[in-house]
Image (tube, coloured by chain):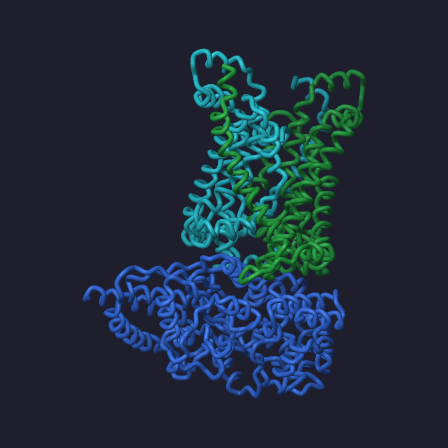
Chain colours: A blue, B green, C cyan
């Protein structure tokens, strides 16, 4: 018992050290104090958890969509697994991690076989979850377990079907423009409040030989989210219901739709995105921004850890700001209407031989003082739980800008357009918005394809 | 003695491993594929028998035809660009003699021993429109426009270039062996008759290389049909479905679009096309040969 | 002989030929030199305008990271093991079958050999989907068999073809002498035939290696844990893990290209001969 205790202490001290290393670049004074506290808190928790161990060795196979285990969300996930292993020496955790697209492909391969991993990454969106739940692949969770977990209102809706809960949401994701403050200043650009200002800024950056906005077009979904944002700006407060109605009825006569596509095409033609954006992958589009090649980067709040990532040159990482989709001429929306949703999360598979153990691990990860707190303190992302009590006052300015954006929001999109239908709809939607952007489809082609995909 | 050579038990024991492997790893999956090709199995859950529905869809599926067209383009690229270059290089190389000959032969083959994964990722960087090698070379030459080799319209050519580059050494080596096998007496006789270099090539080298060329052409067509790994890693069939090949398309259908049954129907068509093309090519060459 | 040929080519012609050959060599090699160059740079130097960059400080650390975090040795070991096993199995099975079809007398031997060779025309990826179902039912996914079985099966037709055609050129007299001494068929294959097949064994081994060394589509579909993953995974995993650090990605690419390259340079002559023989016959 004593030995174990010391082990747990050592381990948590190590984690704290790692934490300090990661979040160290923000404000350095006082960091030691908070780390000390954290060590203590974690240690007492470890001590109480240790005696409850069950006998017999258990191996939990985890399949994760976070291949980078050394920074960002992957690091947090890994830390929690390590922590859990230390507290439960009888539990072994085997991790297989692939990037999003490979993950989804392999997930389907697993789903067609009989040997699924136990704890998996999942998305609380119809496009991913519906078929999976219908095939009975995911284990049902007990909602009352999570009463005290502080999930924000509606965060678990995506993972619920017919009143049953099948997974937990990891984050509150907000899609936005990251921008390089220094480049904005050098080129005399201020944060755009309207879309016209944004287009004017595009011209200035192009004249300066910079890429205005770097875009991950090869994954396709960022462009679909861009469309979602534009639709919100045109359609206003009813955007969420209107999108759903369009998908359900295959009816794209809403007057906002042609305007959205028109502006989107105008944006692409104006050269807002880099040459070859349609084939640029996630990492490359981000690297263009973090190496000062582009002035803006269109991506979700889960990349807020750029501000503390030491692989990124200091003059860039310290100068990152963020703004949401500006309002458009003739639109009913305002700049405070934001595109945000609770998407990615974890679930346990129904046929797992170690289902109970996997659920225990899941529940452990989502204890507010674990996922929620660690993510915020490390500047990684905003959890889908109420993390207000973990505000430390030492956040990066980027983190605070995101919090402000959410707190000041007047309207929230919920699940984005592409993820609101079936899997076939998602494919059709994402493909056709890319093909439209490169001039291969007319707006009517797009609407026909979207309607056909839901038949 | 005769007895020993027709001993059924011995024959069976010698053949068994080979046949078992063939039946379990090649024949069984093909049969299973044929079965799934008639269903609407999505990979998970239940499925039902839908007859020839998948094949009807396949005939009207423009991406399938794109994949076939891409294979055809690649075969043409191999036969009309890679092979002539490889053959010329082989003929010239043969005349160098000595250490230089060995050195060049060694260098030309190097891309072939490098893993496809490395090649594909490397070329992804080379093609990058923002900081890739191609862009840098063009900039150095004074070109200021924007070029995205993997973009719409260009991607298939970019893919062809990589495949032609990668396989060059292989083709070269085979032609080189063919050239080496030509009896030097033929060249001597030609030289004595005062034949020029190009005449020697067209009247001696080329006709004598015919069998080698036939083998190489058949192999080029087959490998163009089978293409999968490089294109999957380089473009994943995109943008859109422009650079899809049959193998990458069946993979996409089965594992990305939840159409396992349809994917298997593509597999079956894929096998049929490979068999038919090989047989057709062999026939063609056999007739010509007579 | 060489002298006569050399005499045919005049001096300036030779220089032009060498110049052209050098150009071809540069085209073939430049991407790899580029790879090596940037693998020694800092990631940010990638964004400078130079075609080749002289690194400000050589970043050996890239290789250190690639070596320690990429499971390099583990994957290399798997690759070597799986490929070697595949080669051995292909050799044994194809020599046995070639002997049965070439030397022994039975009715169906023609049909059997056509069947064996037919596999050459069937694309390995067409069996990707059904094999997944089969291996899953047999609980073979994530085991070494999930790779070995298809690798052996799809290299076997070529192996069989090459060994058959080579075996037909071995005179029967040797075996007959052994038969008179009272040797059984198995001993004849093992003691007389096998040693005589050296050249084709080299060829079959090399072709099998080249066929399977690069394969990863099956590997990525059938394997889930690190246990049996092969060398290409070094790269696939690294690009996810170090997505923002290009230089380390370049280092890991160079590193995983190295083993095959080194083997090739050492065995250059044998490989060239082997491939040439295999390709011309196949």
At x 59% / y 46%, what residue is drawn? Answer: B31
Q: In this view, does A138 lie to the left or right of A80?
A: right
Residue C120 percent coordinates (x, y): 61, 37
Quadrant of residue A46 within the rendered picture: bottom left
**Res. C33 visible in picture:** no
Q: What residue is shown at x 71% (from left), y 26% (from top)?
A: C11
Reply above or below: A393 against B3.
below
Count of numbered tags = 0
Q: Which of A117 and A102 is in front in this view?
A: A117
Residue with the most extreme left position: A2
Residue at 41% in and 82% down? A150
- Rendered position, C152 above or below C92: below
- Residue placed most toward the observer, B195 or A70: A70
User: Which one is in front, A4 or B256?
Assistant: B256
Nearest the camera: B153 or C5?
B153
Q: Residue C245: x percent and y percent?
A: 50, 59
* Residue B144 seen in render: yes
Q: Which quadrant of the rendered structure holds the N terminus of chain C?
A: top right
Residue A342 at x, y = what percent? 51, 76
Q: Position of residue A132 (x, y in %)?
A: 52, 67
- In the image, A251: left or right of A305? right
Q: In this view, does A25 lie to the left or right of A229?
A: left
Quadrant including the C terminus of chain C: top right
In the displayed structure, C226 sits above or below B87; it is below
Among the 4 quarters of the image, the one containing residue A168? bottom left
């Amino acid at each position: 018992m004593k030995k174990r205790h010391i082990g747990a202490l050592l381990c948590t001290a190590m984690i704290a050290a790692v934490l300090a290393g990661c979040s160290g670049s923000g404000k350095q004074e006082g960091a030691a104090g908070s780390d000390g506290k954290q060590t203590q808190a974690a240690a007492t928790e470890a001590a109480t958890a240790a005696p409850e161990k069950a006998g017999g060795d258990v191996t939990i196979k985890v399949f994760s969509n976070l291949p980078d285990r050394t920074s960002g969300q992957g690091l947090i996930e890994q830390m929690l697994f390590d922590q859990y292993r230390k507290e439960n020496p009888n539990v072994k955790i085997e991790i297989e991690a692939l990037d999003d697209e490979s993950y989804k492909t392999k997930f389907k391969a697993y789903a067609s076989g009989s040997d699924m991993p136990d704890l998996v990454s999942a998305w609380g969106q119809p496009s991913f979850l519906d078929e999976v739940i219908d095939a009975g692949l995911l284990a049902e969770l007990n909602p009352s377990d999570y009463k005290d977990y502080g999930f924000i209102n509606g965060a678990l809706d995506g993972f619920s079907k017919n009143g049953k809960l099948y997974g937990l949401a990891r984050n509150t994701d907000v899609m936005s423009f990251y921008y390089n403050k220094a480049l904005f200043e050098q080129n005399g650009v201020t944060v755009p409040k309207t879309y016209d200002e944004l287009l004017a800024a595009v011209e200035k950056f192009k004249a300066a030989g910079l890429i205005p906005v770097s875009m991950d077009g090869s994954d396709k979904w960022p462009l679909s989210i861009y469309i979602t944002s534009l639709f919100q700006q045109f359609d206003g407060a009813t955007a969420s219901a209107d999108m759903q109605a369009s998908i359900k009825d295959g009816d794209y006569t809403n007057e906002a739709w042609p305007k959205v596509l028109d502006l989107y095409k105008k944006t692409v033609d104006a050269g807002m995105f880099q040459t070859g954006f349609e084939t640029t992958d996630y990492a490359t589009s981000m690297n263009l921004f973090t190496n000062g090649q582009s002035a803006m980067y269109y991506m979700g709040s889960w990349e807020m850890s750029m501000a503390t990532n030491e692989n990124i040159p200091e003059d860039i990482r310290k100068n990152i700001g963020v703004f949401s989709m500006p309002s458009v001429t003739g639109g009913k929306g305002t700049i405070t209407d934001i595109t945000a949703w609770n998407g990615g999360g974890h679930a346990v598979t129904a046929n797992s031989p170690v289902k109970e153990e996997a659920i225990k691990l899941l529940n452990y990860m989502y204890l507010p003082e674990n996922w929620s707190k660690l993510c915020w303190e490390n500047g990684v992302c905003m959890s889908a739980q109420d993390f207000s009590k973990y505000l430390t006052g030492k956040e990066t300015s980027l983190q605070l800008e995101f919090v402000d954006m959410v707190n000041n929001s007047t309207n929230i999109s919920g699940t984005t357009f592409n993820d609101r239908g079936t899997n076939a709809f998602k494919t059709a939607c994402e493909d056709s918005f890319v093909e439209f952007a490169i001039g291969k489809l007319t707006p009517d082609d797009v609407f026909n394809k979207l309607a056909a995909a839901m038949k | 003695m005769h007895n020993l050579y027709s001993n059924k038990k011995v024959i069976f024991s010698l053949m068994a491993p080979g046949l078992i492997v063939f039946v379990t790893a090649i024949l069984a999956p093909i049969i299973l594929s044929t079965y799934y090709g008639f269903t609407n199995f999505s990979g998970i859950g239940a499925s039902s028998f839908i007859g020839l529905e998948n094949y009807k869809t396949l005939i009207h599926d423009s991406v399938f035809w794109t994949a076939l067209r891409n294979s055809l383009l690649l075969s043409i690229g191999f036969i009309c660009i890679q092979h002539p270059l490889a053959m010329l290089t082989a003929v010239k190389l043969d005349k160098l003699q000595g250490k230089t000959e060995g050195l060049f032969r060694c260098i030309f083959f190097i891309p072939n021993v490098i893993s496809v994964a490395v090649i594909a990722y490397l070329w992804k960087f080379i093609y990058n429109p923002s900081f890739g090698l191609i862009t840098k070379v063009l900039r150095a030459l004074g070109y200021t426009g924007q070029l995205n080799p993997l973009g719409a319209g260009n991607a298939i050519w970019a893919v062809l270039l990589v495949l032609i580059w990668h396989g060059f050494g292989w083709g070269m080596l085979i032609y080189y062996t063919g050239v080496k096998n030509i009896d030097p007496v033929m060249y001597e006789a030609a030289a004595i008759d005062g034949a020029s270099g190009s005449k020697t090539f067209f009247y001696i080298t080329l006709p004598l290389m015919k069998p080698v060329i036939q083998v190489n052409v058949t192999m080029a067509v087959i490998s163009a049909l089978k293409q999968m790994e490089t294109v999957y890693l380089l473009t994943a069939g995109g943008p859109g479905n422009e650079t899809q090949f049959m193998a990458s398309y069946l993979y996409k259908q089965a594992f990305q679009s939840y159409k396992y049954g349809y994917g298997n129907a593509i597999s079956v068509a894929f096998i049929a096309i490979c068999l038919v093309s090989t047989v057709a090519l062999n026939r063609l060459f056999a007739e010509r040969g007579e | 002989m060489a002298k006569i040929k050399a005499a045919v080519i005049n001096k300036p012609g030779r220089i032009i030929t060498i110049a052209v050959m050098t150009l071809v060599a540069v085209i073939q090699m430049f991407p790899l030199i580029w790879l090596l160059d940037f693998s020694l740079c800092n990631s940010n130097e990638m964004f400078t305008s130079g075609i080749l960059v002289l690194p400000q400080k050589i970043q050996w650390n890239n290789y250190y990271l690639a070596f320690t975090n990429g499971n390099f040795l583990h994957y290399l070991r798997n690759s070597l093991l799986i490929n070697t096993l595949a080669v051995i199995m292909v050799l044994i099975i194809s020599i046995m079958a070639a002997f049965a079809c070439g030397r022994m007398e039975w009715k169906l031997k023609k049909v059997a050999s056509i069947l064996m060779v037919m596999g050459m025309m069937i694309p390995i990826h067409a069996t990707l989907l059904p094999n997944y179902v089969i291996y899953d039912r047999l609980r073979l996914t994530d085991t070494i068999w999930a790779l070995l079985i298809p690798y052996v099966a799809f290299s076997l037709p070529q192996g069989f073809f090459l060994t058959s055609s080579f075996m037909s050129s071995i005179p029967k007299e040797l075996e007959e002498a052994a038969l008179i001494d009272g040797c059984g068929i198995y001993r004849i294959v093992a003691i007389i035939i096998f040693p005589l097949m050296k050249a084709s064994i080299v060829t079959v081994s090399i072709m099998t290696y080249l066929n399977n060394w690069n394969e990863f589509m099956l590997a990525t579909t059938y394997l889930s844990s690190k246990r049996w993953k092969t060398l290409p995974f070094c790269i696939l995993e690294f690009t996810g893990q170090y997505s923002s650090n290009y230089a380390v990605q370049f280092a890991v690419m160079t590193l995983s290209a190295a083993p095959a390259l080194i083997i090739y340079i050492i065995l250059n002559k044998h490989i060239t001969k082997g491939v040439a023989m295999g390709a011309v016959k196949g």
